[in-house]
Amino acid sequence: MTSTESTSTPAPDVTKNPATEFSHVGIQVRDLSVSLPFYRDQIGLEVVAEWVVEDPTTREAIDLPQATLNMAVLRLPGTNAYMEVIEYQNVERTPVDPYHPNPGTCHIAWYVDDIDELYDRLVGMGLEPVSRRVVPIDGGPLDGGKVIYMTDPDGIRIEFLESSLYLDATPRVTR
């Protein structure tokens, strides 16, 4: 099999799989007051809830007895795709190096309908591009699409995809 070929593995029997549905992705940020406007105003996510967490149950679950969590839950409008953005307070914090190949790092990806306009707008706002240009996708399940990578205010990699297909090569309905 070449790197451009893909195989489809059947979904596991969910009666035997403990994970039954995707809930959310969570990211930890330096300053919620900087990250929240970025994800809300520039990416277009809607704020579902904002609150400060200081309860003993949460502190026990995360094993940080002194932590305060300044947090927000955002959603891609019209979907059940949630993102939790958390600023940990009252605990030692060390920024990680989110460079792509570093183990333990991640990226967040969204489909967009006009990647060229988005790239120009985000670069015009001073956002740090990882991609020097909009890059055509050559091969794989999104063949013929376009991609860019940018960084959020904390350096977390964000991928934007313009494609008529989903990752499993099924057709994507665009707005």
Image (spheres, helix red, strand yellow):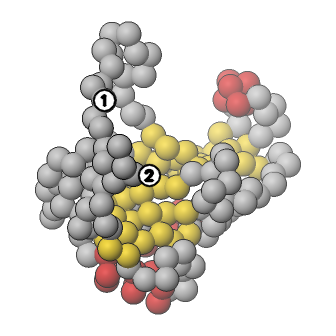
Where does residue 145 sit, x and y in percent of width and height? 26, 67
Against 86, is 7 above or below? above
For the residue labelled by badge 2, is the local secondary structure a helix, a strand or a loop?
strand
Q: Nearer the viewer, residue 170 or 107?
A: 170
The residue lying at 72 percent from left, 48 percent from top is 88
The tag on residue 9 is 1
* Residue type (three-letter) at the residue carrying disc 1: Thr
Which residue is most to the bottom? 124
| Contact, mark 1 vs mark 2 (Cβ under 8 Å) | no
The mark that comes first in sequence, 1 or 2, is 1
Quarter holding the C terminus is: bottom left
- Residue 151, relative to residue 61: is it above or below? below
Q: Position of residue 84 (x, y in %)?
A: 52, 47
148 relative to 10 in the view: left or right: right
Indicate the amino acid at tag 2.
Leu
Q: How many marks?
A: 2
Identify which residue is drawn at 76% across, 58% down: 95
> Would you say 56 lies left or right of 135 here?
right
